[in-house]
Image (cartoon, rainbow, N blue to C red):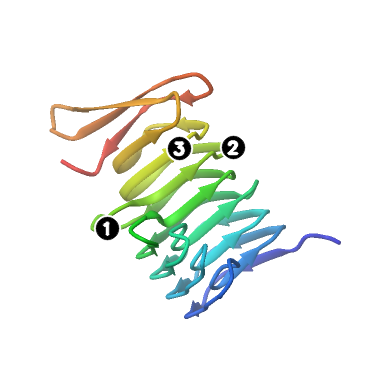
């Protein structure tokens, strides 16, 4: 059949819960979800406390996803994407997510496993006061991070990257990849994370840390 499109313009989805891995509020199994506004909050699921993408595409232009949890799998407190699912974020805020299982904290707010993640605009992701990583990227097919603010840590493992300037992060960790990162301080005492290209990776620019 024809894959559908879900458009969210406003309103609030609150307190959704899924006992399986299908997203506490919304599960996208194909097609496209566009979030233009509104709020998704305080939802719970094994993976993707608010939204799980099993396939298809999620475009976020505005709105807020907050306070959602993935207490079992420790993956994607707010959003979990897998397989070849794609997340494109032009705006909006994703904060207050929690992913925690047996002391593992991977992707409090967003976790992408094998899909693609693109970020470019007035984007805010993360929480600075949590252990673990606000954004977790694992074996992603494509990552392009151009502009936005990630308050918290980013962990990328074995991903294919295109990393550009104007992205503010607290810390960037790269594992199981040919990319290396070196922290230096500029004349204003901001931490500059310089990334060096490696086999299979495409990199341009540098990251300016939110930490001083």
* Numbered tag placed on residue 157 in the rendering: 3
Q: Nearer the viewer, residue 70 or 59?
A: 70
Residue at (45% x, 19% y) in the render: 198
Earlier-in-chain disc, 3 versus 2:
2
Is 170 situated left or right of 48 in this image? left
Whether 143 is drawn above or below 91: the answer is: above
Q: Nearer the viewer, residue 163 or 111?
A: 111
In the picture, the quarter occupied by the N terminus is bottom right
Earlier-in-chain disc, 1 versus 2:
1
Give the labeled residue for mark 2.
141
Whether 148 is drawn above or below 183: the answer is: below
User: Pointer 1: residues within 10 angstroms few (<14), some, or many (20+)?
Assistant: some
Label 2 residue SS: loop
In this rendering, the label closer to the viewer, 3 or 2 = 3
Q: Quadrant of residue 210?
A: top left
The residues tagged by marks 3 and 2 sit, at their Cα atoms, a distance apart of 12 Å
Residue 87, percent across and down?
56, 50
Residue at (41% x, 25% y) in the render: 179
* Numbered tag placed on residue 112 in the rendering: none
Whether 197 is drawn above or below 159: the answer is: above
Disc 1 to disc 2: CB gap under 8 Å: no
Give the labeled residue for mark 1.
130
Is 105 situated left or right of 201 in this image? left
In the picture, the quarter occupied by the C terminus is top left
Residue 9, percent across and down?
56, 70
Label 1 residue SS: loop
Residue at (83% x, 60% y) in the render: 2
The residues tagged by marks 3 and 1 sit, at their Cα atoms, a distance apart of 20 Å
Residue at (39% x, 42% y) in the render: 155
């Amino acid at each position: 059949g024809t894959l559908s499109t879900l458009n969210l313009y406003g309103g609030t989805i609150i307190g959704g819960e899924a006992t399986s891995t299908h997203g506490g509020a919304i599960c996208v199994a194909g097609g496209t979800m566009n979030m233009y506004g509104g709020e998704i909050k305080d939802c719970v699921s094994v993976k993707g406390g608010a939204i799980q993408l099993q396939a298809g595409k999620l475009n976020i232009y505005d709105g807020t996803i907050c306070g959602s949890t993935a207490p079992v799998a420790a993956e994607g407190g707010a959003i979990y994407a897998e397989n070849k699912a794609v997340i494109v974020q032009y705006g909006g805020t994703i904060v207050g997510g929690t992913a925690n299982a047996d002391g593992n904290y991977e992707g409090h707010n967003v976790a992408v496993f094998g899909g693609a993640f693109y970020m470019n605009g007035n984007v805010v992701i993360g929480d600075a006061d949590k252990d673990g990583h606000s954004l977790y990227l694992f074996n992603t097919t494509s990552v392009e991070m151009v502009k936005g603010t990630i308050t918290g840590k980013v962990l990328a493992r074995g991903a294919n990257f295109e990393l550009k300037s104007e992205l503010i992060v607290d810390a960037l960790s790269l594992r199981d990849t040919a990319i290396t990162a070196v922290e230096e301080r500029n004349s204003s005492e901001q931490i500059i994370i310089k990334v060096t290209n490696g086999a299979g990776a495409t990199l341009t620019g540098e990251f300016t840390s939110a930490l001083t």
